[in-house]
Image (spheres, rainbow, N blue to C red):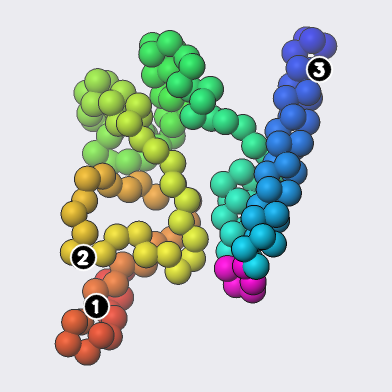
Amino acid sequence: IVSRMTRSIALYRIGIVRYNEKLKEIDEFIKMHDIKGDIRQRIHEFYHHKYGGQVFYEEKILAELPLALRIDTLQGMHQELVDDVFFMQNSEPGFIEQLLIGAKKEIFMSGDVIVRKEDTMRNFYIIIKGVVSLQLINPKSQSSEDVV
């Protein structure tokens, strides 16, 4: 038990160190390109949402796992999602496995446009956290109308 606790604490500290290193890289990038104001703040917010104070290379860790273990891990990580999303609830296990293997986490910030009406879609989004506003834009008046 002590060994596991020591290892957990060490991994936690490594994540914090990586996060601080990432912040230094971001600040150097911002300074080098003279990025100011709102954009600077949005970049910082994005990385805060993405890493939440720690940096772990989740995709790399998962990619190194054997396929069966990767599937089991993904199912464990996302069981609540599978239980909550209506079209997944009664789906075949193979369908769920393929969705989880192909899923990619994306983070969008307030004001980001995720998709436009004219875009060709090759994927779909499941909102894990946050709120999305759907708007239709009238091309004649350029006014927008909230749908949801």
Q: Tell which circle, 1 or 2, labels the residue nearer the N-terminal end.
A: 2
User: Of helix, strand and loop, which one carries label 1?
Assistant: strand
The alpha-carbon separation of the residues under discs 1 and 2 comes to 9 Å
Which amino acid lies under the numbered mark 1 shown in the image of this protein? Ile
Q: Which mark is residue 137?
A: 1
Residue 31: give x, y in percent of width and height.
69, 62
- Asked whether disc 1 touches disc 3, contact meaning CB atoms under 8 Å apart, the reply is no
Magenta stretch, overall SS: helix
Residue 64: give x, y in percent of width and height.
48, 16
- Give the camera-side residue of 71 and 55: 55
Q: Which residue is labeled 2 in the image?
A: 117
Which amino acid lies under the numbered mark 3 shown in the image of this protein? Thr
Residue for point 57% across, 31% down: 57
Left or right position of 39 against 125: right
- Give the camera-side residue of 34 and 14: 34
Q: Which residue is labeled 3 in the image?
A: 6
Residue for point 27% across, 34% down: 88
Quadrant placement of the C terminus: bottom left
Can residue 117 be seen?
yes
- Asked whether disc 1 touches disc 2, contact meaning CB atoms under 8 Å apart, the reply is yes
Please say whether residue 83 is one of the residues in the magenta stretch.
Answer: no
Q: Which of the 4 image quadrants contains residue 100?
A: top left
Q: Which mark is residue 38?
A: none
- Above or below, 86 relative to 113: above
Q: Which residues are magenta?
A: 35-39
Residue for point 35% across, 46% down: 126
